[in-house]
Image (cartoon, helix red, strand yellow):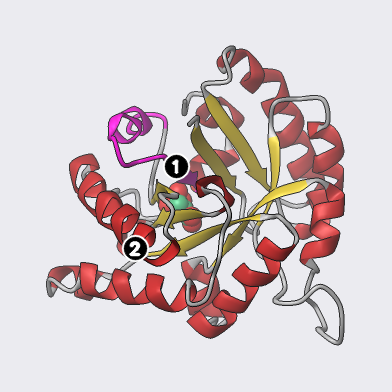
Amino acid sequence: MKKLIIANWKMQRGYRESLSLAKELVKKLPKKTPNGAREIVLCPDYLSLSAVGDILKKTTLKLGAQDSAPADKGAYTGEVSPAELKKLGVKYVILGHSERRRHLREESLLINAKIKAALARKLIPVLCVGENLSQKEGGLAKKFLNEELRQALKGVKIKTAADLVIAYEPLWAIGTGQPIIPLEAEIINRFLTERAAMILSKKVRVLYGGSVDATNAGEFLKQKHVAGLLVGGASLRAAEFSKIN
Ligand code: PEP
């Protein structure tokens, strides 16, 4: 399967900036993946999603959302429906990102409902999991990750291995410029691949995310169980992101 590279622009770019960034990437990226060796996904903020989607039409780049609601329709002030995202041409949706867990108090029960609602609309959830520094230092990373996975995937059913993606994002590596050592990512990604296979009966893709940039991406992508990358900061600069392949 193609390695998956997902750009998470978070709330770092406004409407106009997102459109220019998308246009710049359209010019740079398709030439970099002539044989379709990578699937590249851009996740702008909600305000820019539709317009960026228009820019990506007739290109090899795919559209992703940074979150979606736990239901298709109803009294959910401020939320965005997975059914509407699907109509816009969104393919992937990031769910359970650590910033949403931390700043917006999102918990596993809600993330689980969002995963099910996204799958019902044939969106591909990108479930983010990751331990914090004290869990890592206390030797509790695997125990914690297993529990995060178990809760988020409770009762989740997928038809094929391509229907869901997991992103391993150690909290201490996100936005710090200090990524995990690629071999360590391989060990954890393999663990997550195996645990998810037990829960879902399918060998889903597991990405790595956390301070990936053009200088270290290649080493991560060489690892057998690193099915791709989730990129934050380095995806905001077209010249840098276009070198991550
Ligand atoms: C992220 O927030 O998903 C992320 C990976 O960010 P960064 O690449 O900036 O560490």
> Residue, x 55% and y 49% (percent of image)?
160
- Picture coordinates of residue 4, whole percent (x, y): 51, 37
> Residue, x 22% and y 67% (percent of image)?
142
Q: Amino acid at mark 2?
A: Met
Residue 229, placed above or below residue 83: above
- SS under mark 2: helix
| Residue extending farthest bottom | 75
Is residue 180 among the parts visible in the rendering? no
- SS under mark 1: strand
Where are the magenta residues, as a range?
A: 214-232
- Picture coordinates of residue 232, whole percent (x, y): 51, 49
Q: Residues within 10 Å of mark 2 (few under 14, many from 20)?
A: few
Asked if residue 42 lies left or right of residue 176, the reply is right
- Picture coordinates of residue 75, whole percent (x, y): 86, 87
Judging by the rendered image, the residue that carries numbered circle 2 is: 198
Residue 217, placed above or below residue 109: above
Judging by the rendered image, the residue that carries numbered circle 1 is: 229
Mark 2 lies within 8 Å of ligand 1 (Cβ measured): no
Report the Cα–Cα distance between label 2 and label 1.
23 Å
Q: Earlier in the sequence, mark 2 or mark 1?
A: 2
In the foreground, 52 or 150: 150
In the foreground, 90 or 25: 90
Asked if residue 142 lies left or right of residue 130, the reply is left
